Amino acid sequence: MRIAELSQQTGVPVPTIKYYLREGLLPAGELTRPNQANYDDRHVQRLRLVRVLLDIGRLPIATIRQLLAALDEPDPDVHTVLGRALPSAAGGKDSIDPERVSAARVRIDKLAAERGWLVGRNAPARQAAAEVLAAFELVGADASALLVRYADVAEDIARFDLSFVGQASDAEGMLYSAVVGSILGDSLLAALRRMTQEHESAKKFGIRGDD
Amino acid sequence: MRIAELSQQTGVPVPTIKYYLREGLLPAGELTRPNQANYDDRHVQRLRLVRVLLDIGRLPIATIRQLLAALDEPDPDVHTVLGRALPSAAGGKDSIDPERVSAARVRIDKLAAERGWLVGRNAPARQAAAEVLAAFELVGADASALLVRYADVAEDIARFDLSFVGQASDAEGMLYSAVVGSILGDSLLAALRRMTQEHESAKKFGIRGDD
């Protein structure tokens, strides 16, 4: 299909598609003439993925480029790339001083060791977790109990997540599911958590006028 | 304290503090002279909160302004504001067609009704959850089983979250905890989930060189 049809099928304007092509978020189409390219269903699928990672995952363009590059590699390190896609691993954390983050990192490493988690020493998720923990402390909140409880929950979810990934029939599909399940899964869980928080709060403090 | 000391205590540069003052993210200091204001510990605390909501929560300035305004109101609707702070509720979802979102919304409303969740009909979290569900579908992933499992997990976390909020001694502290716990909690859970996903994956598919 031509770029106009790709635009029509996905609802993404042509100039935006051209921007994604320039930014390397979308592989080039097959050139049919010097000035005309052909796109197929894989472009439709990729374009949809880019849009939900931007809109729902709210990931920066550079992070999406890394994620997509990992999807296209023969032996991708998808965990490292997914770890880098965590908001707290996005850099620019000059608001939290490094000593505080280092101290939090020791606690995260201890937690992972005690629970026997097989996680690379340099996994970005370790540092991301440490930065969030340091942020809790910086704003004066004690996250100790929360950390233990969330670790339990994370263990529980991860077992399920792997079965979600395992539904795919091939390696490419499994990678795709890991990316989709992780990024969209964070957002789905956050939204459901807000709903259940409102529910628990309504039970405890009474119901608001809206209901 | 003067603005220079506020900057020193928080590590936030003076021009950035002035920007937050203009944007209404930080209340004005007490004027001591026409051109000089005095800041106190509440400004330090507020400034730290703004920074972690920006850096770790990756929230847009406008959303942070809404959250902070809710904190300062006498009878704030913190759930609605927290719901609006969800990435998927941030608007600009022209990548997902409205019919798809409407269909997903019916499923979310059904889920909430079946589980007896006391959640406002217009709660932004409902729409946010529907948009993520529609996004899963758009990229070709079946999120049915995931939705049920995550709803269980969300119920479980919310009960714990309310006890975290309940630690605070006054209404202001509880609101503050709700904001911190929800926004930073999402990030902490996402980071721990990446670690446990890597662990489950290592158990299933073998360990990578990094370990």
Image (cartoon, coloured by chain):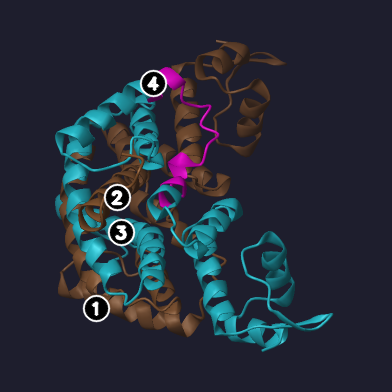
Chain colours: A brown, B cyan
According to the image, label 3 marks what residue? B189
Residue A167 appears anywhere in the view? no
Q: CA distance from mark 1 to mark 2?
A: 33 Å
Discs 2/4, front: 2
According to the image, label 2 marks what residue? A198
Q: CA distance from mark 1 to mark 4?
A: 44 Å
- Residue drawn at the location 41% of the way across and 75% of the way down: A134
Q: CA distance from mark 1 to mark 3?
A: 17 Å
In this image, B123 relative to A21: left or right? left
According to the image, label 1 marks what residue? A110
The magenta stretch is: B82-101
The image shows residue B76, relative to residue A46, as above or below, that is below
Res B106 quadrant in image: top left
Q: Secondary structure at mark 3?
A: helix
Q: Amino acid at mark 4?
A: Arg
According to the image, label 4 marks what residue? B100
Q: Residues within 10 Å of mark 2 (few under 14, many from 20)?
A: many
Discs 1/3, front: 3
Q: CA distance from mark 4 to mark 3?
A: 28 Å
Q: Secondary structure at mark 2?
A: helix
Label 4 chain ID: B
Q: Are marks 2 and 4 on the same chain?
A: no
* Image x and y of residue A118, in percent: 21, 64
Q: Are marks 1 and 3 on the same chain?
A: no
